[in-house]
Amino acid sequence: MTDSLFQPIQLGKLTLNNRIVMPPMTRSRASQPGNTANQMMAKYYAQRASAGLIVAEGTQISAMGQGYAWTPGIYTTEQVQGWKLVTDAVHNNGGTIFAQLWHVGRVTHPDNIGGQQPISSSPLKAENVKVFIDNGSQEPGFVDVVEPREMTKADIELVIGQYRQAALNAIESGFDGIELHAANGYLINQFIDSEANNRTDEYGGSIDNRLRFMGEVVAAMTDAIGADRVGVRLAPFTSLNGTVDATPEQTYTAAAALLNSLNVVYIHIAEVDWDDAPETPKAFKADVRQAYQGVLIYAGRYDSDKGAKAIDDGVTDMIGFGRPFVANPDLPSRIEHGFPLAPHDPNTLFGGAEAGLTDYPEYSPS
């Protein structure tokens, strides 16, 4: 029974039609030059507007924040205009859409950031991590990341300001809110996780210190656009892009408590989702639920039944279904009616054009 997925829910001032979230998924289709959202992307998101909430793909807050070729930005006038195409299309189809704001920190290569050295919490290279660069063809060229430089206090202040401005730009672009990407090994996560941060100032060492940068970024954004329009994505147990925390349960329960004190509208937890990954500990989920009073979203290896049960059990309020949304633009309808799900083509996930983006049909009985 999946009824609980189809109950409305209040998210700040917004009333969402269902509990199904389309989480952020990088598709690398932004127009070049300029990394600008475009009509093709607008069509893609509009096709999926029946989700209770869409969180658009990771969108860099500055030129230095870009990790991969062809991902969209939200720091130029042209980029703001490009995103307006997307938000208008989604709203015209009755949908709700948040922007995911990211800075990749060390998970990049000088070729993607104008030849500069990447920045991070500490001068620690992400081991065994590759990113793709534009090598002059439609095929991404994968290269190893490089050692970053440690951010100075001035760098930290600058980036906090860039996050704040990006939040304002997102609202100007017509987004209903923003999600701070604090997961999956990117910049915020490089401060949070103990093994990626060896700073000795107030941004390193203790859990509270390692959470400080995230807290300051969130405070700047909520001040700019209101806490009811700011969500945060966390990935407590993943080691994606080389970030590992020594005590993830303690660190991320503290993160949930901090975000509760900042009144963010939701926390979006990315669970480990590779095939033989361990389950997120039940005790941790209970601790997060106790520490944080807002809307909780979990995404990972959920099917509709498992997602509905998590809502029924009070573990979460909404469920993100990532890969299924790629090939099933009408995913909520398919779940509701028990229609089969189409598989996606992994070869068309990143880069290219309409193929593998907007050409997946809605379900029709054959």
Image: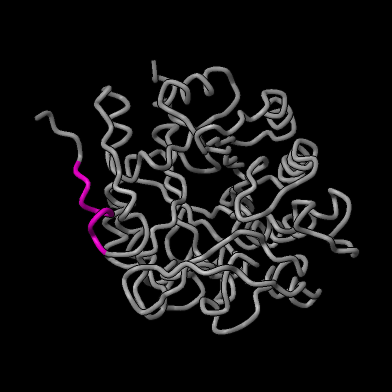
Q: What residue is rendered at 40% in x and 77% in y?
A: 135
Query: Which span of residues is magenta-colored?
Result: 353-361
Q: What residue is rendered at 32% in x and 54% in y?
A: 347
Comparing 120 with 276, the one in front is 276
Q: Does the magenta portion include 357?
A: yes
- Decide if residue 7 is on the left or right side of residue 177: left
Q: What residue is rendered at 29% in x and 39% in y?
A: 343
Comparing 139 with 256, the one in front is 139
Q: Please determine whether, in this image, residue 9 is positioned above or below residue 63.
A: above
Residue at far top of view: 1
Indicate the colouring scheme: one colour
Per the picture, the main secondary structure of the magenta-coloured stretch is: loop
Q: Does the magenta portion include 36?
A: no
- Decide if residue 71 is on the left or right side of residue 182: left
Q: Please determine whether, in this image, residue 269 is positioned above or below residue 194.
A: above
- Image location of residue 305, percent across then percent down: 42, 20
- Image location of residue 167, percent across then percent down: 56, 63
Comparing 303 with 216, the one in front is 303
Q: Please determine whether, in this image, residue 14 is positioned above or below residue 89.
A: above
- Image location of residue 137, percent across then percent down: 32, 75
Quadrant where the C terminus sits is: top left
Quadrant where the N terminus sits is: top left
Q: Residue 78 occupies which quadrant of the picture? A: bottom left
Q: Residue 272 occupies which quadrant of the picture? A: top right
Q: What residue is rendered at 34% in x and 60% in y?
A: 86
- Image location of residue 9, percent across then percent down: 48, 32
Q: Residue 129 occupies which quadrant of the picture? A: bottom right
